[in-house]
Amino acid sequence: MQCPRCLNTDPSYFYHGSKGWYCRRCVSFGRVMLEEELEPVSLEEIHDDGQEYTLKYPLTPAQIKVSHECAEKIEDTDILLKCVCGSGKTEMVLETIALMLGKHRKVCFAIARRQVVLELAERLSGIFHHARVVPVCHGYTTVTDGDLIVCTTHGV
């Protein structure tokens, strides 16, 4: 048995309900019965100049150092920036976002709160002028494909 959406094969996640089998691993995205066929997802290509960005202010030397290190290490490892509010975490990952967009890879920027998603998407649109920045959060949009996707980290 294999889930057509998340490709799970662990039998402990499957449940047989009144309408058939479904996967509980990804049920928070909506119930998909195993017997159903999902239509293939078709994603748009990333804009060629999507990686170009402009900031209206310079980064500090410490922010520049962290920015370069993130861009250098992102291919080989996960990176966690643990900084206080207002320290420039967003600005420090712009170089990494630009690097991934330049390689024609989509970027997802996950935030815990809906309002911050909307604010950050607007802000990133002003920084990445040629990229399609898409805010994805409950009750706001039906468009979920872009070059840079800003979304919430939870369902409803």
Image: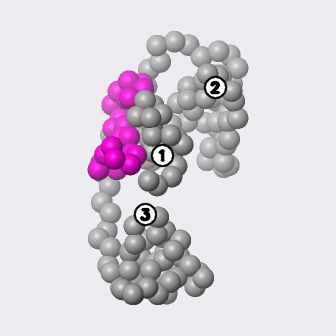
Compared to residue 69, the image places residue 29 above or below, namely below
How many numbered discs, if any? Answer: 3
Cα distance in 3D space between marks 1 and 2? 18 Å
Compared to residue 129, the image places residue 5 above or below, namely below
In the picture of the structure, the residue carrying the numbered disc 1 is 152
Q: Residue at x 68, y 27 (%)?
A: 84
Which amino acid type corresponds to the residue marked 1 in the rendered image?
Thr
Q: Which residues are magenta?
A: 121-146
**Image location (x, y in percent) of residue 136:** 39, 45
**Image location (x, y in percent) of residue 19:** 36, 86
Q: Residue at x 35, y 27 (%)?
A: 129
In the picture of the structure, the residue carrying the numbered disc 2 is 85
Q: Nearer the viewer, residue 57 or 21?
A: 21
In the picture of the structure, the residue carrying the numbered disc 3 is 29
Cα distance in 3D space between marks 3 and 1? 13 Å
Note whether residue 110 is visible.
yes
Which amino acid type corresponds to the residue marked 2 in the rendered image?
Cys
Which amino acid type corresponds to the residue marked 3 in the rendered image?
Phe
Q: Residue at x 68, y 41 (%)?
A: 80
